[in-house]
Image: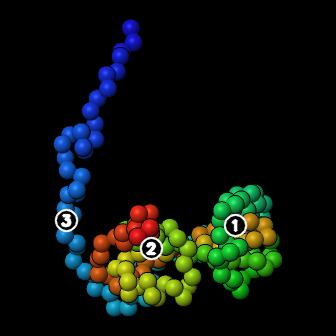
Amino acid sequence: MAQIRRPGVSGRIARGESVQNPPKRGPLPPPEHVDDPTKPRSVVDYGLQRSADVTRLHRGGLLSSDFCDADPYLLKAAKFHGEDCQRKCPACSRGGLRELRYVYGDELGPYAGRIRKADELPRMCSTFGEFRVYVVEVCLECHWNYMIKAFTLGDGTPRRAVPSIRADDLLD
């Protein structure tokens, strides 16, 4: 016999909790000592893995579709927001290789996951305590894509996340 579900009362308002006074957040952690906020730290360089993958690709150990399958959104981002690099594409040996820098971090709030130019990163270092940068190379010709580096930047002083802008605020 099938069980009949009865409608339940759920949600903060139904439980009698106030929506006006959200719970208070705890204190921020102590600041981390950083000598130069613009100098990358906790660097992970994928250069050796990239070289090994390129070698296996050219020797026939891998299919070109393993690396030349960039998402259409990644290709569009590389076309309009990517920065030209002086390197040639390791898969097709043509130009058109672009670099994208994605930034992530709790302090960035709604701006996490966005693409930033290399010259914007030093300004962000004095505004945010810690954020992670992921550098991806993309070829517009053959759709090669590879994450080549990841590192942390920031001045080490923890801050609250940047608040998101509500639609109501834009109308005022």
Q: Earlier in the sequence, mark 1 or mark 3?
A: 3
Q: Amino acid at mark 3?
A: Gly
Helix, strand or loop for disc 1: helix
Q: CA distance from mark 2 to mark 3?
A: 23 Å
Tell which of 101 and 48 is nearer to you.
Answer: 101
Q: Is residue 8 left or right of residue 126?
A: left
Residue 75 bears which disc, if any?
A: 1
Q: CA distance from mark 1 to mark 2?
A: 22 Å
Q: Which residue is mark 2?
A: 132
Residue 8 bears which disc, if any?
A: none
Tell which of 24 and 159 is nearer to you.
Answer: 24
Helix, strand or loop for disc 3: loop
Q: Is residue 141 left or right of residue 134?
A: right
Q: Splitting the image into 4 quarters, where does residue 1 fall? A: top left
Where is residue 153 drawn, in percent x and y?
42, 81
Are circles 1 and 2 on residues that touch, CB within 8 Å? no
Q: Amino acid at mark 2?
A: Arg
Are there few (<14), some (14-19), or many (20+) residues within 10 Å of tag 2? many
Where is residue 72 drawn, in percent x and y?
69, 60
Helix, strand or loop for disc 2: strand
Q: Amino acid at mark 1?
A: Leu
- Residue 112 visible in rendering: yes
Residue at 31 percent of width and 22 percent of height = 6
Are there few (<14), some (14-19), or many (20+) residues within 10 Å of tag 1? many
Protein image colouring:
rainbow
Q: Which residue is mark 3?
A: 26
Q: Nearer the viewer, mark 2 or mark 3?
A: 3
Residue at 50 percent of width and 67 percent of height = 113
